[in-house]
Each structure stands twice: as structure tokens, then as C-alpha cells.
Image (tube, rainbow, N blue to C red):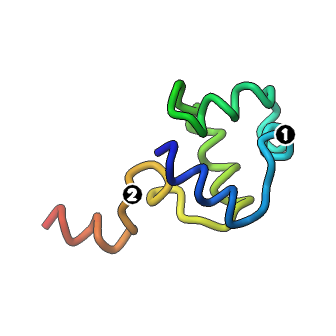
């Protein structure tokens, strides 16, 4: 998850400070998420995914929604 979050933030040219403001946490928290030290709470996943225009399921699991649906069959 950390690598996907970091990659999505880099692609969008979004700093940890900016993402922290989106989800009302400290910049330090976001830096920990990006490094894989801690995991963001679900509400933060949803907000960051929406702001970065990425699928929240992909951000959490690395799979697209369609792939996850096919795998469960």
C-alpha cells in the first residue's frame, strides 16, 4: 500500500503536507503511510484516493475493482 500511495502522490505532484491537510492529520502521519510504517485509517484512504483520482480498492489492495470481482468467482 505504501508504494502505491507514494507513487500516486508523486504522479499527482502532491506533497505529504498537502495530503495531510486533505485528511486533517499531521504531515508526519502521511510520511509514515508513504514509508509503510503505519497504515492510514479507512476515511483517510477514501479521501486521499478521491483527491488523487485513484481507485480506493486499488490503493488498498493493488487490484482494480474488475480484477477483484473476477478473482472472487
Q: Alpha-carbon neighbours of circle 2 within 10 Å: few (<14), some, or many (≥20)? A: some
- For disc 2, the marked residue is 62
Along the viewing direction, whichever of 36 and 50 lies nearer the viewer: 36
Q: Locate the C terminus and report the quarter of the image it occupies.
A: bottom left
Along the viewing direction, whichever of 69 and 12 lies nearer the viewer: 12
Left or right of 9 on screen, residue 45: left
Instruction: Assign a secondary structure to mark 1.
Output: helix
**Which residue is rendered at x = 74% and y = 59% of the image?**
51
x and y percent of residue 6 in the render? 60, 50
- For disc 1, the marked residue is 17
x and y percent of residue 48 in the render? 68, 50
Q: Alpha-carbon neighbours of circle 1 within 10 Å: few (<14), some, or many (≥20)? A: some
Residue that extends furthest to the left in the rendered view of this protein: 73
Left or right of 26 on screen, residue 60: left
Q: Quadrant of residue 38?
A: top right
Q: Quadrant of residue 57?
A: bottom left
Instruction: Assign a secondary structure to mark 2.
Output: loop
Q: Are marks 1 and 2 in contact (CB under 8 Å)?
A: no
x and y percent of residue 11 in the render? 68, 66
Left or right of 24 on screen, residue 46: left
x and y percent of residue 40 in the render? 58, 33
Mark with earlier residue (1, 2): 1
**Which residue is rendered at x = 18% and y = 65% of the image?**
71
Residue 43 higher or lower than 38, as above or below: below
Q: Quadrant of residue 19?
A: top right
Residue 66 higher or lower than 55, as above or below: below
**Which residue is rendered at x = 80% and y = 37% of the image?**
20
Mark-to-mark CA distance, 1 and 2: 24 Å
Residue 50's disc is: none
Amino acid at each position: 500500500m505504501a508504494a502505491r500511495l507514494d507513487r500516486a502522490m508523486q504522479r499527482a505532484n502532491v506533497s505529504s503536507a498537502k495530503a495531510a491537510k486533505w485528511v486533517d492529520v499531521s504531515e508526519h502521519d502521511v510520511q509514515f503511510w508513504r514509508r509503510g510504517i503505519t497504515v492510514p485509517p479507512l476515511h483517510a484512504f477514501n479521501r486521499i484516493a478521491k483527491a488523487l483520482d485513484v481507485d480506493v480498492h486499488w490503493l488498498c489492495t493493488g487490484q482494480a475493482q474488475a480484477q477483484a470481482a473476477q478473482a472472487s468467482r
